[in-house]
Image (tube, rainbow, N blue to C red):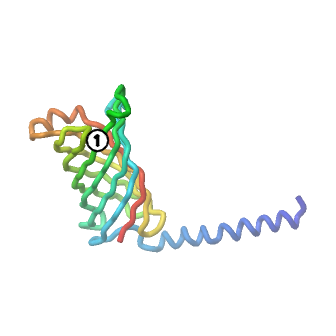
Amino acid sequence: MNTFKKLSLALCVSALLIPASTQAQSMQTQNIGPSKGDREFSLSGTGTSDKDFDNSSFGISADLGWYLTDRTVAGVRQSVSYADIQGEDLSDDFWNGSTRGYIDYHFGSRAARPFVGASLGAIYGNGVEETGTAGLEAGLKYYVLPSTYILGRAEYQFLFDSGSSANDNFDDGAWAYVFGIGFNF
């Protein structure tokens, strides 16, 4: 490659990197993420598996939350899922739903924001007995724009129909996981 072509290629690459560098610097100086009083909405793909990963379900989940502080969000989560039970005919697969309240605490103030939290609600549908559900969760929101993030969350959920059964059923819980996108407004 002659010198002119090398110089032209270097200039083109430099021209492409300048906007990316400027955007990264702009993200560092702007307020990233929510403030007290802001709301959030996220839409995620969901999945659950029993503790042995034998039976699984897949669906969608939507969250609507309100920031009580810059780091604490409380809200409502609605999920709808399709369950594929091992060994069953396709005609015996099930649709399920769950509605849960949640509260999460976020760490940090940069683009990557890990969080921990808990949820409490109900599960219903033709594949489960209608009952209460509770869980602990952890995840990460990564802000790709000042008010737009991608999200990954894992929840350990267990079912109960009374206080004593919640304690008994904790060891028989299931993992739920989501990946999605969200917005603060």
Q: Identify the residue at horizontal 38%, vertical 33% (top origin).
A: 90
Which type of secondary structure does the marked residue at label 1 adopt?
strand
102 or 140, which is in the foreground? 102
Quadrant into which the N terminus falls: bottom right
Mark 1, residue position: 156
Estimate the x, y position of residue 131 in percent, counting from the top left. 16, 42
Q: Residue 149's image quarter?
A: bottom left
Q: Answer left or right for 99 relative to 61.
A: left
Residue visible at 82% across and 67% down? 7
Q: Amino acid at mark 1?
A: Tyr
- Judge from the rendering whether residue 64 lies leftward or rightward of residue 169; answer left or right: right
Name which residue lies at 9% across and 36% down: 164
Which residue appears farthest toward the right when viewing the image? Answer: 2
Whether residue 103 is situated above or below residue 13 in the rendered picture:
above
Q: Residue furthest front?
A: 91
Q: Give the x, y percent position of residue 48.
A: 34, 40
Which of the 4 quarters of the picture holds residue 135? top left
Residue 153: where, in percent of width, then height? 36, 49
- 15 or 170, nearer to the observer: 170
Q: Position of residue 81 (x, y in %)?
A: 33, 45
At label 1, counting other C-alpha atoms closer than 10 Å, the crowd grade (few under 14, some 14-19, many 20 or more) is: some
> Is 127 on the left or on the right of 109, as rendered?
left
